Image (spheres, rainbow, N blue to C red):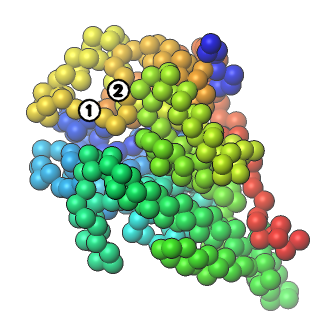
């Protein structure tokens, strides 16, 4: 029988355009004309920080947004185009103070070396609040932007076939190697590698910089990085998973896994699968948070939330569905659901506001106080770093340990 959560919940917000409903940009307060300004993103992160949330993720991609999985849809009545997520996070970092910043990174076509130094830089700019959300791309039109390799056409039905699963597994194996190379690059400078001794003229101790000599199927990286070890040692790594293949990536390489349970029993099964994967990967002693993703429509009563969703669907020309469960209701009802899911082993949640200008303030000003009243959420930030907020220790440097 399920019990109440043993410890307070963690909460993250997924930021994407004007919100997760494709018609969200048409709401009067949505600010679509400001989507490509720093001020717009700064305001969103400030609101999330006002609610004492653990971190925000920022969506990204290598192709235009599309309502179809494997191809462009040609629609011009939905938000298309976005800014680079890592650069948004870097711009916002000096304007925020305690909340974590986790941009999405596409592993399939980018280089681990470039991303390692970008996220290390973000960790310095934010004073220890950086992370990344690793994502793969199997879409042929995105591969065409780079020209290094071609992918056959794919849709969700094909991905569910044995051949599709094998192809997906290869992409996620590449992503696991990618994260491993990035993690090693973060460790390639020991913490005290910088001497900065003006009297002797020594700035760096060369013996404390290490070649990582990573060799994988898709790339090899010699190292060391050009950026000293980040303030957190290892910035946060997160990944989204819907099934067994990405669950293995979460179990092997992530600090936080985002999953999409449909009910409490589904949440329990997903957590068990990821914990088994941790054991298989030799990470039984590591803390790996499992966050449930929910798309949320919050109002004063459930009828108003349902009516708002229906109105947005009508504007968009059809019913919007999500890869995550959709919640329509009140903050109190959502708090009930989060507690029910948490009792099955989820340690936190990443909420996707359907309309950012409406649902994000509802989360910070209605849901958070409700959770606080129940003793399920913090009343003040208790740490200065993102790892600290999530109860993750600063890890030792693997190369320093090997040298010792």
Q: Is residue 249 above or below residue 332?
A: below
Q: Secondary structure at mark 1?
A: loop
Residue 53, picture quadrant: top right
Residue at 49% in and 52% down? 133
Numbered circles on residues, count: 2
Q: Position of residue 1 (x, y in %)?
A: 62, 13
Q: Secondary structure at mark 2?
A: strand
Label 2 Cα crowd, 10 Å radius (few <14 / some 14-19 / many 20+): some
Residue at 58% in and 30% down? 346
- Judging by the rendered image, the residue that carries numbered circle 2 is 326
Apparent side of residue 36 relative to residue 196 in the rendered image (left or right): left
Q: Position of residue 373 (x, y in %)?
A: 60, 14
- Judging by the rendered image, the residue that carries numbered circle 1 is 321
- Distance between the alpha carbons at the discs numbered 2 and 1: 8 Å
**Circles 2 and 1: CB distance less than 8 Å?**
yes
Apparent side of residue 391 relative to residue 207 in the rendered image (left or right): left
Would residue 383 be seen by someone viewing this image from the given angle? no
Residue at 75% in and 44% down? 285
Residue 352, picture quadrant: top left
Q: Position of residue 8 (x, y in %)?
A: 65, 25
């Amino acid at each position: 029988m399920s019990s109440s959560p043993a410890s307070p919940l963690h909460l993250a917000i997924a930021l994407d355009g004007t919100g997760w409903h494709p018609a969200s940009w048409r709401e009067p307060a949505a600010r679509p004309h400001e989507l490509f300004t720093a001020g717009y993103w700064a305001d969103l992160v400030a609101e999330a920080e006002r609610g004492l949330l653990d971190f925000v993720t920022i969506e990204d991609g290598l192709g235009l947004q599309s309502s179809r999985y494997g191809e462009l849809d040609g629609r011009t009545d939905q938000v298309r185009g976005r800014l680079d997520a890592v650069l948004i996070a870097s711009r916002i970092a000096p304007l925020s103070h305690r909340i974590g910043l986790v941009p999405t990174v596409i592993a399939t076509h980018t280089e681990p070396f470039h991303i390692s130094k970008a996220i290390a830089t973000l960790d310095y700019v934010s004073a220890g609040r950086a992370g990344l959300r690793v994502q793969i791309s199997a879409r042929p039109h995105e591969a065409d932007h780079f020209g290094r390799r071609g992918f056959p056409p794919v849709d969700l039905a094909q991905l569910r076939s044995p051949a599709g699963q094998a192809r997906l597994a290869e992409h996620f194996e590449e992503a696991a190697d990618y994260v491993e190379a990035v993690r090693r690059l973060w460790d390639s400078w020991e913490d005290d590698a910088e001497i900065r001794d003006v009297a002797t003229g020594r700035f760096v101790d060369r013996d404390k910089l290490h070649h990582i000599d990573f060799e994988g199927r898709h790339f090899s990286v010699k190292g060391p990085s050009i950026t000293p070890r980040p303030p957190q040692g290892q910035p946060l790594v997160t990944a989204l998973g819907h099934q067994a293949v990405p669950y293995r990536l979460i179990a092997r390489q992530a600090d936080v896994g985002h999953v999409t349970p449909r009910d409490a029993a589904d949440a329990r099964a997903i957590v068990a699968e990821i914990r088994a994967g941790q054991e298989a990967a030799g990470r039984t002693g590591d803390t790996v948070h499992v966050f449930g993703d929910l798309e949320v429509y919050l109002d004063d009563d459930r009828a108003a939330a349902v009516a708002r969703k229906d109105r947005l669907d009508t504007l968009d020309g059809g019913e919007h569905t999500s890869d995550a469960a959709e919640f329509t209701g009140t903050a109190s009802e959502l708090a009930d659901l989060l507690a029910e899911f948490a009792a099955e082993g989820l340690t936190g949640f990443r909420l996707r506001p359907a309309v950012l200008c409406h649902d994000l303030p509802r989360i910070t000003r209605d849901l958070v106080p409700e959770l606080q009243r129940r003793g399920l959420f913090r009343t003040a930030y208790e740490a200065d770093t993102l790892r600290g907020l999530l109860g993750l220790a600063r890890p030792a440097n693997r190369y320093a340990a090997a040298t010792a």
